[in-house]
Image (cartoon, rainbow, N blue to C red):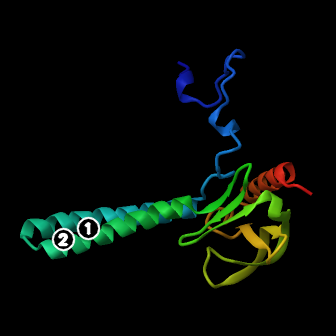
Amino acid sequence: MPLPFLTADRAFDATDDVALPFDDHDHWRRPYRPGPWRVVASALLLLLASFVLLATVIIAAAGTLPGAAACFAVAGVTILIALRMLRMGTWVSRHGVRRVRLFMTVTVAWDRAVGVRTVQQPVRWLGLPRTVQGQALVVVRRQGEPLALLTDHNADFLSRGEAFERAADTVEAWGDEYRRP
């Protein structure tokens, strides 16, 4: 029994002139899916936060409100870090390219970019200090040093070479379309 309302590949009516959400180039979007390492790390942090929230309830039931407040604050920070980890990555729009990290976000407008290209260079393995030889997608800025957007050894693309190539090609295509020479 087909369930067309559950699939994304169903045929749309030709009379619909409404743009699909992914057709609006003014909104920031990630041109790839988050990798399994990032999703697993975020899921484990959310699991830890659920245990801390359970401890908060037990501590509050015991009558120690300052301890419960401290546990609640730790759980809140853990949840915020897990959600921020899911937001990390490279985002593109008509306005530019954005690199979102855990504590910092860098946005480069397309008119301030000279080019977007894939280069061979030492890259960090899962964001740790250890470096390995790999590929990185960098945006070359008019002023300042190049900004690495994606690497083939980060939490989104570790052991997913084809996904890295597709994401790099997509970001390069966005750059070619919206960058002014």
The kind of residue tagged 1 is Phe
Residue 175 drawn at (x, y percent):
82, 55
From the viewer's side, name the closer residue of 145 and 59: 145
Residue 137 drawn at (x, y percent):
78, 66
Residue ID at (65%, 49%): 29
Locate the C terminus by quadrant.
bottom right
Element type at mark 2 = helix
Whether residue 90 sits left or right of residue 69 in the image: it is: right
User: What's the mark number on residue 72?
Assistant: 1
Q: Quadrant of residue 91?
A: bottom right
Element type at mark 1 = helix
Query: How far is the residue under mark 1 from the one under mark 2?
Result: 6 Å
User: What's the mark number on residue 68?
Assistant: 2
Q: Quadrant of residue 151?
A: bottom right
Residue ID at (88%, 55%): 180
Q: Is residue 147 above or below residue 12?
A: below
- Is there CB contact under 8 Å for labels 1 and 2? yes
From the viewer's side, name the closer residue of 163 and 99: 99
Q: Is residue 125 above or below residue 90?
A: below
